[in-house]
Image (spheres, helix red, strand yellow):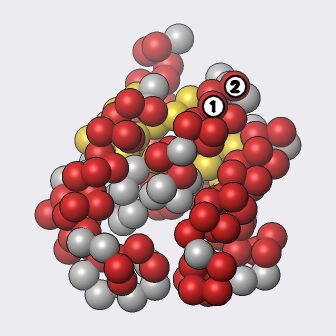
Amino acid sequence: MKGIALCGFMGCGKTTVASALSQKYNLNHIDTDKFVEEENQITISEMFKLYGEDYFRDKEHEAICILCKCCDYVLALGGGAVLFPRNVKALKDSGYKLIFIDTDFDVIKKRLENDKSRPLLKTNDMKELYDTRYPLYENACDIKLSCNDESGEQLADKIIETIAKEG
């Protein structure tokens, strides 16, 4: 295994878990959405508004390819990253273990109820988006872990334990 990539719906806790993994196990972590923003000097919301989702998805793919070639990271992927087979292929071909942070819709809805920064929530029904994406997360992942009440640290321990058991 080269690295760990965390996937799941927006608000599931990917960034929090990636941070906990990096602190507890001395791993480098990167949030791919933040990486895309820094590399392109524009927020994702602005990217969507000015250039559209396809443009963002191309930039997201470029970022994943760059990160897969660099070092071993814990990647907190954007909520839509694994919906595109090219991203899943790049991660798996690079040796990343893809972990689905499976969080119940009601938990996510509560976490995101006041979040105005996510462009897809402005134009889509959240439940419909969740239901559409859920099977894609399941199909892409190597490991699926439930996370509703666990802290980032608890889930980080669970991830390391599960990976160790798999050998």
Q: Secondary structure at mark 2?
A: helix
Residue at label 2? Answer: 93
Q: Hey, what amino acid is under mark 2?
A: Asp
Question: Which image quarter: residue 63?
Answer: bottom right
**Which residue is situated farthest in the left direction here?**
106
Q: Seen in the image, is 148 located left or right of residue 43?
A: left
Question: Which image quarter: residue 68?
Answer: top right
Disc 1 and disc 2 in contact, CB within 8 angstroms: yes
- Work out whether 40 lies above or below 99: below
Q: Hey, what amino acid is under mark 1?
A: Lys
Image location (x, y in percent) of residue 154 = 36, 46
| Residue under the image location 36 percent in, 65 percent down | 11
Disc 1 from disc 2: Cα separation: 6 Å
Residue at label 1? Answer: 89
| Residue under the image location 59 percent in, 75 percent down | 52
- Work out whether 50 lies above or below 76: below
The foreground one among 128 and 12 is: 128
